[in-house]
Image (cartoon, helix red, strand yellow):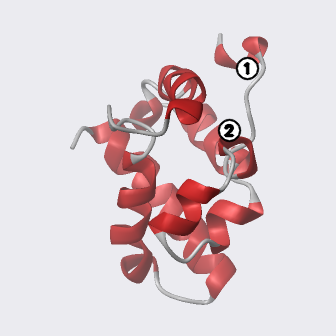
Amino acid sequence: MTRDDETLVRILAAARAEQLGTSEAAEREFSGKVLCLFSDPAKPPEYRAHAEAFRRAFQGIANSPSLQSTFRESLLPAILTVRSLKEALELPFATLVRELSLDEEA
């Protein structure tokens, strides 16, 4: 796992913990699995383009407080409350993470 991946997992786990009233540690494993959907080559075809844009947009997040803030703000309620990977896969990507405009990706 890269530092960027670790940062993404930490931010998502903290946000889920806050939303669900659990601990960050309790949310880390699930958060890592959900984020794997964004990089797994076997991801559903409808996720592919969104996931690739997502990964490009957050390259270097480990060293960028601005990207960390943008990522946290991009998390939508569904990704903070989804309880299973199956449930996450059944949801459109755009209901999990706010899509970034081209300006935000630059």
Residue 76, above or below 50? below
Q: How many marks?
A: 2
Position of residue 80 measured from the top left corner of the image (x, y, whole percent): 64, 67
**Disc 2 to disc 1, how far (Cα)?**
9 Å
Circle 1: element type: helix
Q: Nearer the viewer, residue 21 or 37?
A: 37
- Residue 8 in percent (x, y) is at 45, 48
Q: Quadrant of residue 82?
A: bottom right
Whether 56 is drawn above or below 89: the answer is above
Q: Residue at x 41, y 39 (%)?
A: 43
Residue 27: give x, y in percent of width and height. 44, 75
Would you place residue 60 above or below residue 80 in this image?
above
Pointer 1 local density, CA inside 10 Å: few below 14, some 14–19, many at least 20: few
Near-viewer residue (89 or 12): 89
Identified at 62% across, 89% down, the residue is: 21
* Of residues 95 and 8, the one drawn nearer to the viewer in this rendering: 95
Closest to the observer, 44 or 84: 44
The residue type indicated by label 2 comes to Thr
User: As drawn, is 74 to the left or to the right of 49?
Assistant: right
Residue receiving disc 1 = 104
Numbered mark located on residue 7 in the image: none
Extreme bottom residue here?
21
* Residues at marks 2 and 1 touching, judged by CB atoms closer than 8 Å: yes
Q: Which residue is painted at 77% across and 12% down in the image?
A: 103
Q: Quadrant of the C terminus?
A: top right
Residue 35 at x, y percent in the picture: 43, 49
Q: Residue 70 got which mark? A: 2
- Determine which quarter of the picture holds residue 30: bottom left
Please, what secondary structure does the residue beneath circle 2 have? helix
Residue 12's place in the image compared with 57, above or below, is below
In the shown orientation, is residue 93 left or right of residue 51?
A: right
